[in-house]
Amino acid sequence: MADWRRHRILMVSDFFYPNFGGVESHIYYLSQCLLELGHKVVVMTHAYANRSGVRYMTGGLKVYYIPWKPFLMQNTLPTFYGTLPIIRNILIREKISLVHGHQAFSTLCHEALMHARTMGYKVVFTDHSLYGFADIGSIHMNKVLQFTLADVSQAICVSHTSKENTVLRLVYRKGADLLVEVIPEVCRLFPQVRFIVGGDGPKRVRLEEMREKHSLQDRVEMLGAVPHARVRSVLISGHIFLNSSLTEAFCIAILEAASCGLLTVSTRVGGVPEACTVFVLLPRPNLL
Amino acid sequence: MGDKQSGVHAKYDYIHDQESSPSPLDAHHVEVRRSGAKPVAACFFAALVSAYAFFAFYSKEKPNILAVWGIPLGALLMMKLCWRTVKKESVLIMPTFGVQLETHYRSGRIIRRFVPMGKILKPVLQECVTPVTCYWCLSLLLRDEEQLMLVFKEIRSPLKMLIPIWKALCAAADEGGGLEECGPDG
């Protein structure tokens, strides 16, 4: 049986009571459940109007309303090290053993997780959001999330869809998961089509699993990492270049393929429509 | 005789004086331990600012008239850092009469505040949160007053030092509040 011990948990988020919402309710009810199990829970959030200081809620839930003004959409101003003194003070005086941050859009959450990891605490992150990859806000948020998730002890997602979305955001850019869905379907519809996949990365495993699952070993050739000097020789061995990126500022690969005489098919994201307007077929990426 | 509790905190000393005759007086003092480096550094810095102001003002090459403001600035800085430093804060509890709160500065100035016992509703320990820190403070809930009165205005002493003072204030307030409830007609 696993060794069970009581923890002193610090929940951090920009979103808490007196605001009402999914994240706020989640934090409150999770805290109540943990209190019933015998753990000690402290919540840290920013001040709301004249609600500032220390308050106690049902079950002895202690809430720190830090007098930081919300900057934008209920978020505190990101200062990186501005919140370090108060976060460190709370971690030490409450003898916290675990820090649990909520919501990707909460700047206070990201800063608290960063400082807690720096001080050697275990941290957990729960993602409540579900968003895309192509617009500037999502791209920025994904970069921040990569930074945070690189060093958390555990990550929790509130649904299976959220889990897929969060995992995608970690190596989302080149759309390898789109290929996993598209390749078997194309092979089924067009028996004469073969795929040559060049490149390496964390998603290569998924492509190889797809190949094994659908028995496409003779239809899908995995080259692995291709040195740049060999790119041309690989390109001219094909007829169609498929780009499944979920975000691209320009996509030089399309121009390289087109200059080698290939017909180019690409997802309509980012700067791709500007790079190629004449000879490409441009669907919008849709995993559904 | 005072009961000194040092070593509880690196910055403060707690002294408890209790006299039983001719009249019972319960005195609690929190003294700030003197740091030798701080006044020396403050005076050096103030002298540096003043010297720069003199040099800039009287410089033959390019006198800076505005630098004359550096002289009173240096003097104010020295005053703030050396003379307005708190030496100790005291709580004198006179049962059934009232509570006197004193702030002693190193310059010799003493600020006294007296609160009649009947005015005190309840002494409370509370946590104060600022944008950069969180600390405990001892306050008095006063009758017919909206604002709390801080017992220690300048010093942020640790919780271990505040607890015995809070207990003594609670005991005195309960005792004094019981007599006050009788009213002027008895």
Image: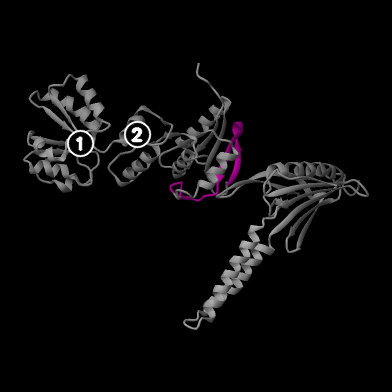
Q: Nearer the viewer, residue A276 or A215?
A: A215
A266 horizontally vs B54: left or right = left
Residue A166, numbered circle: 2
Q: Are marks 1 and 2 in contact (CB under 8 Å)?
A: no
Three-letter code, disc 2: Thr
Q: Residue at x 54, y 46 (%)?
A: A86
- Which picture quadrant has residue A201? top left
A57 horizontally vs A135: left or right = right
Instruction: Check if residue A75 falls in the magenta segment.
Output: yes
Q: How was the colour assigned to the protein in this rendering? A: one colour
| Residue A107 drawn above or below residue B48 | above
Furthest residue to the bottom?
B60
Residue A264, numbered circle: none
Q: CA distance from mark 1 to mark 2?
A: 18 Å
Three-letter code, disc 1: Ser
Which type of secondary structure does the marked residue at label 1 adopt?
Answer: loop
Crowding at dot 2, Cα within 10 Å, few <14 / some 14-19 / many 20+, comes out as: many
Crowding at dot 1, Cα within 10 Å, few <14 / some 14-19 / many 20+, comes out as: many
- Total count of labels: 2
| Chain on which label 1 sits | A
| Residue B50 drawn above or below residue B86 | below
**Where are the magenta residues, as a range?**
A52-76
Q: Are marks 1 and 2 on the same chain?
A: yes
Residue A236 image offset from top left, x and y in percent: 7, 36
- Which picture quadrant has residue B3? top right
Which type of secondary structure does the marked residue at label 2 adopt?
Answer: helix
| Pointer 1 residue | A244
| Chain on which label 2 sits | A
Q: Which quarter shows the C terminus of chain A?
A: top left
- Which picture quadrant has residue B73? bottom right
Instruction: Check if residue B99 falls in the magenta segment.
Output: no
